[in-house]
Image: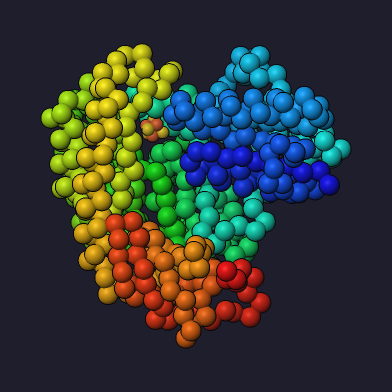
Amino acid sequence: MTTYHISTVGCQMNKADSERLASGFEQLGLSESDDLRTADVVVLNTCVVRQSAEDTATGVLGVLKKCKEADPKRRIAVMGCMVGPKTDELSRRFPQVDAWARPQQFGPILEMAGEVVGIDPDGCVQELLPADPKVATFIPIIHGCDKFCSFCIIPYRRGREVSRPLDQLVRETEMLVSRGVREVTLLGQNVDSYGHDLDPATDLADLLYAVNEVDGLERIRFLTSHPSDMSEKIIRAVGELPKVCENINLPFQAGDDAVLARMRRGYTRSEYLNKIEQVRSIIPNVALVTDVIVGFSGETEAQFAQTLDILREVRFDKVHSAAYSVRPGTIAARQHPDTVPVEEKKRRLAELNVLQEQICAEINAGLDGEEFGVLIDGHSKGKLQGRTRTDKLVHIDRSEAFETRIGGFANVRIIETSPWSLRGEVTAAEMPAAGDRLRVYSA
Ligand code: SF4
């Protein structure tokens, strides 16, 4: 049996791509292998947001070079953000690689795998959708980004924005639901920009209304948003549509206007805070998530304090924080010297994380005794786990009285809280339907 192995790093977009590529391999008759060193077809799905991620991919390619020398029949492909529009230089550096593919360009890799098994993928490989998807799964809706934030390499690697047609996305959602999916997360580097390039132009709100109509689907999420592109129409759609979860990821990156301008983010501090106010006025129970970078070029202590102030003012449910590191090839790498010492960046990051941990602890403590609907999507350390509509991670005590399972919904009363998760007990749960093909909990 010909085997494949896909190694994935990076964001949910990459994970969704890997799931789709795996579906193509399965349709060609390949079977999955855990072992990168022995699989017949190996794919590295790469991330280059940070230089360290690219260095890791380079290291793995060194390991694969030795594997290929031992067995020249082995095929190696690299996809994802490491692959730009031109691959001449990459091919020269890594002659062990047989196929290069940009994100979502599955064709060259499927052709390579097809040659190994002697099958032409054309006509043989149908829709690239996971055959056995997770109950909460990802759907990429727009690829690339037109924003060119000064610190970010994504637009150079993933290219300009290209939206997928709305009817194709609805059909894909229907197929995923027929395979057991109950929650979808619509993905894009800038998901709020969806549809402007389609003919006729459409937008994320239109897509949310259309996906909300899919029978059997219970929840819809979307990420990542950009404050300049999140329109009132989109916010109102989230507020109105019953399946769209009241959970928004809106990165602000820095709290000071001069830093925001150097980052080329396209909004000011007050514009960002006005957007948050608008979101909260239309979606009262919304849970807010954000991304922040500390120690960007030239950031002073006073400017960093402005970032902390936004955390205190908004009180986000979750913050993804990072210390700035220069990404070669970006505008910032060319124009803005990396002036903040590493130790100072680490100190600022630690200070920010301590503050946010305290805020998360306080927000979650307020949920003690509350009851939530939880979609159970996995288990860990003998406990089921799932998420509320507001994306809170809940560990669930086993229940004698109610049958709970992965893929099912349960009402859960919160009995313990921490900054990062909740613990709860089941007060009601769905009974499995006859012929239900969702996976049963068996830990
Ligand atoms: S919006 Fe900015 S940070 Fe996000 S992917 Fe686009 S360029 Fe990068």
Left or right: 81 as drawn, with respect to 412: right
Q: How is the image coloured?
A: rainbow
Left or right: 191 as drawn, with respect to 378: left
Residue 248 drawn at (x, y percent): 33, 51
Q: Residue at x 39, y 51 (%)?
A: 205
Left or right: 25 as drawn, with respect to 59: right
Residue in front for this viewpoint, 324 or 115: 324
Left or right: 392 as drawn, with respect to 102: left
Residue 398 drawn at (x, y percent): 47, 76
Residue 75 drawn at (x, y percent): 75, 31
How many marks the image carries: the answer is 0
Q: Residue 270, located in which quarter of the rendered image?
A: top left
Determine the residue located farthest toward the bottom in the rendered image.
Answer: 401
Ligand 1 placement by image quarter: top left
Residue 119 drawn at (x, y percent): 84, 40
Determine the residue located farthest toward the right in the rendered image.
Answer: 118
Answer whether residue 26 is visible to the viewer in this image: yes
Relative height, residue 204 to residue 209 (above, below): above
Residue in front for this viewpoint, 71 or 436: 71
Residue in front for this viewpoint, 387 or 235: 387
Q: Residue at x 77, y 24 (%)?
A: 69
Relative height, residue 54 to residue 176 (above, below): above
The quadrant of the picture occupied by the C terminus is: bottom right
Q: Residue at x 51, y 42 (%)?
A: 13
Q: Residue at x 63, y 46 (%)?
A: 20
